[in-house]
Amino acid sequence: MFCTYSLQAQIPGYVQGDENYTKTLAFHKVDTLLVVVPQKYKITDQEKTDIENYVFWDQYQKKPFYTYKTEIELTQKDHSGNLQFYGPFCDFQLAEIQNIPIKQVIDGFMFNNEVFSQPTDAFFYMNDEATRLYTCRNSTQVRHQYSNFAAGYFPLYIFRGSELYLSGYCSNNTQQPQLNYIMKMRESYFETIATHNFDFNLAKPICTDSLKKVILGQADRYLENLSNILKTDTLNFERMTTYVYTNMLDLQQFLSMSPNMTIYGKSFGNINHVSTFDMSIFIHELAHTVIGRKVGVQSNSFFCEGFAVYTGYLLEGSNYKSDLDSTKNHLDLLNEDIIIGPDYRFYSFPPLYPISGVFTRFIIDKIGIEMFKAIYAEQNIEHAFLENGFPLAELIAEFKNKYNGNSHIKNN
């Protein structure tokens, strides 16, 4: 289970969440979980993948089997089970939608007397009984961020695009809120400096003249160099925002994530968060942003992280030798199950981070950056490798033979 320990809140007024994700685990402790969409909503395969990949604790509790229905297809028996509502909140017609503190309005929703009608607004809400989960948004053109934020530490999150607007509690029985207004909390915590491409929000205690000089002198150059490595350009980039915190605990609290999660950096579209200003972490998160914008968003954690790690080798170079040495010492960890299996398997073994980078570099050296980018852009990356004549099993065997000399390690 998630271990539990006490930490004093460092952000004034911050309401703490549930480190054990008690309600979240209780809601998902079923054999079959029914996802409900509005009557006329056509859920895509990609959305189903996003919903089902949300479960990040399946080493502790079995992942449920997911089924999907529109609201008019629900039976009386369905109503007695756990339901996850997904899709534009304002389009639902079910009466029970009115039983939560978030209310429907035209083209949006309202909470605590505040209307959220922007196309990028979305929310995550779980009721007191842990029988209903609402993962709803305003626009079908915007991906919900609840999975990326590992929502569930609190029963309530409201998102505005890639930003977290608020988190906390609000009972569906008492309607009394306890909230972290994250955007308001940032106003007293950060100082902002701007470069040609970036807005850096620096925690005030670390916002020194020397750090400002480093950022102003290097950040834009790293973006140009990264774009050259990926054989792309910086055209049509939105300005990128980077939040730099004093420490990891502050990052966890501003993202409303459990303090039990080790997070040095996190990327959400064109918004990056780093636990302190370490250039290697900044470059890694920047790589996620640029790859996501110019190549594609990849849900496979092994290659998502591996591609970002690979770019760091070419920008800095210093980590490759140590990563290669670590990879040689842990070759037995690399197999197809690790690459295509649940995310927790990848994140449970720290040596897999350098392995993913070294293996990605091996593949790119073999097939070229353009071919790798084309494969990376496909959601089913295992199938994409096979379709292009590079079965993962063969790539793994060749990689192991190269770095193990006489590998008898099984690939599965």
Image (cartoon, rainbow, N blue to C red):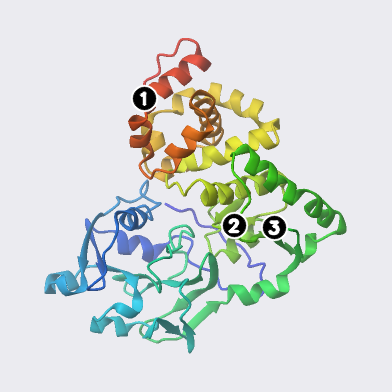
Q: Residue at x 80, y 55 (%)?
A: 216
Give the side of residue 259 with respect to residue 151, left or right.
right
Label 2, on which residue? 236
Are the two marked residues, 3 and 2, in contact with CB atoms closer than 8 angstroms? Answer: no
Image position of 166 with respect to 279: above or below: below
Check disc 1: other Cα within 10 Å, few if <14, some if 14-19, many if 20+: some
Residue named by callout 1: 393
Disc nearer the start of the sequence (3/2): 3
Q: Which mark is residue 193?
A: none
Q: Considering depth in this image, is 131 or 67 the residue closer to the camera?
A: 67
Give the image location of residue 5, x and y in percent. 55, 58
Q: CA distance from mark 1 to mark 3?
A: 41 Å
- Mark 1 lies on a secondary structure that is helix
- Which residue is rendered at x = 40% and y = 71% of the image? 139
- In the rendered image, residue 249, in percent from the top left (x then y), is placed at 63, 59
The quarter of the picture where residue 334 lies is top left
The residue beneath circle 3 is 197
Q: On screen, 25 above or below 343?
A: below
User: Looking at the image, is mark 3 or mark 2 nearer the viewer?
Assistant: 2
Whole-number angstrom distance, CA of label 2 to CA of label 1: 38 Å
Considering only order in the chain, which callout, 3 or 1, is on the residue closer to the N terminus?
3
